Amino acid sequence: MKLKSEIKPAEPNPDETRQMLLEAAGEVFAEAGFRNATVREICRRAGANIAAVNYHFGDKERLYSEVLRYSHGKTLEKYPPLLGLAENAPPEKKLRAFVLSLLLRIFDTGPTSWHGRLMAREMIEPSAALDSLVEERIRPMAAQLSKIVAEILNRPVTDECVRLCAFSVVSQCTFYKHCNPVVMRLFPKQSEMDAAAIEQIADHITKFSLAALKSFIEKKR
Amino acid sequence: MKLKSEIKPAEPNPDETRQMLLEAAGEVFAEAGFRNATVREICRRAGANIAAVNYHFGDKERLYSEVLRYSHGKTLEKYPPLLGLAENAPPEKKLRAFVLSLLLRIFDTGPTSWHGRLMAREMIEPSAALDSLVEERIRPMAAQLSKIVAEILNRPVTDECVRLCAFSVVSQCTFYKHCNPVVMRLFPKQSEMDAAAIEQIADHITKFSLAALKSFIEKKR
DNA sequence: TGACGTGTCAAACAAATGTTTGAATCTTGT
DNA sequence: ACAAGATTCAAACATTTGTTTGACACGTCA
């Protein structure tokens, strides 16, 4: 990583605190939700003073907005929607890539693992920041998936059936996250979400969905 | 100077207040979540005094437990898992009944509509009350669905494939609830969840799932 | 009737928490 | 080196909120 020409590790770097706050806030917001999260805990983890949040972000709510945008950008950068697959690849392969990338994004265990939980919380308690996120980030991805599904179904992307089928695909991915507490209690053994498990689930979802999609194919007339 | 001696606004019905508190608390908890919900707002809607919650339930947390159990019992009573379908009905019909009943329970718009949101919140922030709920209520329903799927697949209920397929079915139902904020923003027009829309979605999910399940059928050997 | 238990009420209490403040410290440009 | 701005700090402030309190009203029963 490259920084400014001067290197002052021990000294308080102006952007250092801001960055630490973003990361710490992401963790805390993901763990506790917006309201439950306390500015004091965020600052404690960031090694910053209590007044730091208000100084750098104005207030708690604007900090949250920045965190949401920051985190989503970071995971999308780590796991692009088609994982670098060529645009002219067969739609079946693109579907699998889409499913796998979505799962990887949701279950990312890296230092940015809070993105998944953050989004899950937005689903239940949407904040003002969700509107722009949907328009700028999610709608393009939805269009991408619709195009893949439409291609498989041999139907126009505006077809109602395409929309419903795209939902059916996405739903299977989000399920393991959104219903994790129940899944974990029902099957404690199989609930470890390591790389192998994610691959297995991606395989199942792709197989399941492709089989279903075949029955919806519009024969050319 | 006694102001109250002349007026008698509320008759002292012992269980009346308690019941009103349960209903009001369900609403408020569903809207705001456990932490965000305030005892003051609950009591205001119930037409009760601020001290009523502590008097009748001890504290806010025990009130929440009672609400969760109460609401789940009420919706399950309203929409039984198979909607009164005969046990010996063909598994395809039972699958559709299961899907429809789950959707109806999730999207119930009656006076108990908050149950769906309540459960959605439990998925993200499980409370202590979830453990017993899963064991007593959800596990039997999961077993019921597994049996139906196993029957269709001609596989043993313990088969890994049965579990994954059952998840695929349930996930499509819960999706419209758990991802409602995004769905609503993506397609504002089609997001009205009236009876007709629910029927349509149930049809799609059943068709989609049955087509997929067929490809997983274990040929007898 | 009159004491007792139940339920309700307004007010107060105590703790948590977002935000502000004013001084102290550090960085930067000249 | 010095001054001005940027940043950090500890303390205090103001508000929200769960809980408690003590008085009051009402029905019950000896």
Image (cartoon, coloured by chain):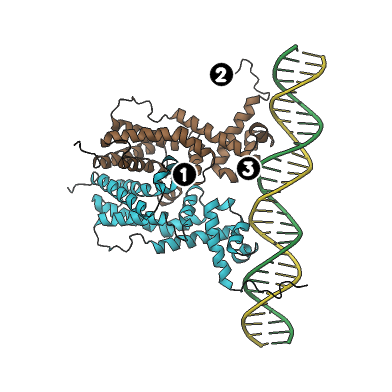
Chain colours: A brown, B cyan, C green, D yellow
**Which of B147 and B30 lies nearest the eye of the viewer?**
B30
Q: Position of residue A168 (x, y in %)?
A: 34, 43
Q: Secondary structure at mark 1?
A: helix
Q: Position of residue A95 (x, y in %)?
A: 32, 34
Query: Residue at horizontal 66%, vertical 40%?
Result: A40
Label 1 – label 2 distance at C-alpha: 39 Å
> Disc 1 designates what residue?
B181
Tally the marks: 3
User: To which quarter of the image does residue A82 belong?
Assistant: top left
**Residue A38: assigned label:** 3
Residue flagged by tag 2: what amino acid is it?
Lys
Say which amino acid is labelled 1: Pro
Tags 2 and 3 both on a single chain:
yes
Q: Please state the chain letter of the residue tagged with numbered disc 2 in the rendered image.
A: A
Q: Is any part of residue A167 visible from this angle? A: yes
Instruction: Determine whether C6 is above or below A135 in the image.
Output: below
Count residues near mark 3 (Cα–Cα under 10 Å), then give few for <14, some for 14-19, many for 20+.
some
Say above or below: A123 vs A76.
below
Q: Residue at x 52, y 54 (%)?
A: B30
Q: Nearer the viewer, mark 1 or mark 3?
A: 1
Q: Is residue A22 left or right of residue B185?
A: right
* Position in image of residue A115 (x %, y %): 50, 36
Instruction: Tell which of A37 and B190 is nearer to you.
Output: B190
Chain ID at mark 1:
B
The residue where tag 2 is placed is A2
The residue shown at (26%, 37%) is A153
Relative to A30, say whether B69 is above or below. Answer: below
Identify the disc placed on residue A16. none
Q: Position of residue A209 (x, y in %)?
A: 30, 40
Amino acid type, mark 3: Thr
Outermost residue, left direction? B221
